[in-house]
Image: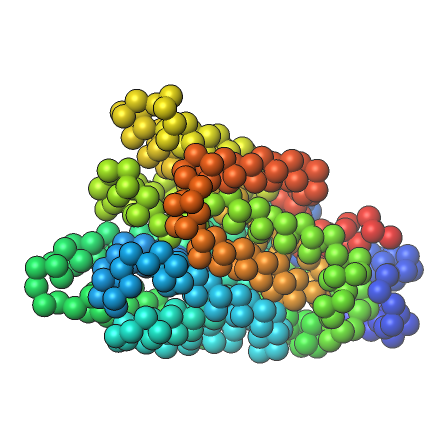
Amino acid sequence: MDSVRRTYTIMRGRHIDKRVPSKDFLSALDKAETAVRLPTGTGKDIGNPSWKRSLPHVLVASLTSLLFGYHLGVVNETLESISIDLGFSGNTIAEGLVVSTCLGGAFIGSLFSGLVADGVGRRRAFQLSALPMIVGASVSASTESLEGMLLGRFLVGIGMGIGPSVTALYVTEVSPAYVRGTYGSSTQIATCIGLLGIPSSFAANSLVDFDMRTSFAGKGILEFITCFGLLVPAAMLAVFMELCVESPQWLFKRGRAAEAEAVFEKLLGGSYVKASMAELMKSDRGDDADSAKLSELLFGRSFRVVFIGSTLFALQQLSGINAVFYFSSTVFKKAGVPSASANICVGVCNLLGSTVAVVLMDKLGRKVLLIGSFAGMAVSLGLQAIAYTSLSSPFGTLFLSVGGMLLFVLSFATGAGPVPSLLLSEICPGRLRATALAVCLAVHWVINFFVGLLFLRMLEQLGSVLLNAIFGFFCVVAVIFVQKNVVETKGKSLQEIEISLLSSTQ
């Protein structure tokens, strides 16, 4: 290990101002790591590290996804009651603002997520993301005006914007490569549980009905679901993150190599530490750890990575998926389907699809799941479009509209949901990973904002057939884009991916 560190120090001194590694530099490090080869990878020489070591840290990080899912769907079932209680019932723009203001806050949070994650570390960033969620939810629960509701939702959104980026970073950086896809997909399961356990928006439906017959105020419903659905997991996140390890990549980038070694030993076992540090040094390439700039992402060699990530997130949102989560109750009600039953089915399909992704992510790979997911979404949108034409009987309309929507959610959860953030965190160079994720997720939130704001209005103006056709078109575009641009990363260590991408751009 000392020889590896000495080699790295010498070569870093020679190449500190260069972005591209010399052959001598890479050769020296290759010789220094002759005993073992992969840090968190396939471990062909000494076997795979135990996944049990890193699992507890991933589970704690997934609490952020649980909170994200909670806030993603919390207004779905209660939106009608909130609008009546606060006096904007029937105003589709105001209803859209209640949803999309949260997304506007998420955009702001995502812009700063890279600075927060790189500045204070991944663990502290998790804890900071919970604070605005708690404050914002409390404001929303106690307000008696639309303005107060919008303020609370905006604060919640700031925390939502920080959380997903940090989760993707942390899970990617602490997971062994052979289960990284599985762990990345497991965060989607946490999101599904958050959507289902509001506690729950479906149970809140009973409270809404009770509210219509008694003096139990609508904001009392919000106080109920806030206390049990938000405060407990937020407190658990803040407390248990103190027991988790910091990202070894972040520690190494901050010059704390000894601490990074200790973390690798906790996550992987002592026999993997030398190989882990060797490849971490190799991927660092002598770059200045503090020189990551936005211009490198927009105009440098990393532009292709940002382009792929931003486009995937944009197509994910233009598929119309969050319109389902935000407004499924409204849509099902217009179709004559009991919203509570329909929403439970949506949540179950989302959870089932996410489970399938966990099983297949490290077997079939990211690219196959993305193509199959977007293709399935396009087919399901076609079924929904047919449901609202004269070609369908009343029974056919009910079957195709509800069945198509459930197939849409199932297809999304198998690939288009969990893959983009995982893939982007894998292909981004370590030095730029947090900043690149922040930029790409900012694109995600901007488009998510406009979908949330305009969906009900577009549904009124365009009708279901044309709107589903538009969403379906973007799903087809996504299939073509993935086929031509996305690279497969399954089973490769982060350092292997980074070095291979680096060599392909030279």
Find residue 461 and report its horizontal and vertical position in percent: 42, 45
Q: Nearer the viewer, residue 313 or 92?
A: 92
Q: Percent from the top left, x then y, of residue 299?
A: 79, 61
Q: Residue furthest left?
A: 214
Q: How many numbered tags mark residues here? A: 0
Residue 356 appears in the picture as rendered:
no
Above-or-below relation of 420 to 482:
below
Q: Measured from the top left, where is residue 259 in percent x and y?
A: 62, 74
Question: 230 or 232: nearer the eye?
Answer: 230
- Compare residues 210 and 176 and report the one nearer the observer: 210
Find residue 158 and report its horizontal and vertical position in percent. Answer: 47, 71
Which image quarter is the N terminus in?
bottom right
Q: Is residue 284 above or below residue 305?
A: below
Which residue shows up at 22% across the image and 42% down it? Answer: 338
Q: Quadrant of residue 256?
A: bottom right
Which residue corresponds to the image point at 80% horizontal and 61% vertical from the top-left? 300
Residue drawn at x 87%, y 68% is 18
Q: What sort of colour scheme is used for the picture?
A: rainbow
Tell me if I can see residue 318 in this picture: yes
Q: Quick check: 153 left or right of 24?
A: left
332 relative to 249 in the view: left or right = left
Q: Is residue 306 left or right of residue 455?
A: right
Residue at 64% in and 40% down: 482
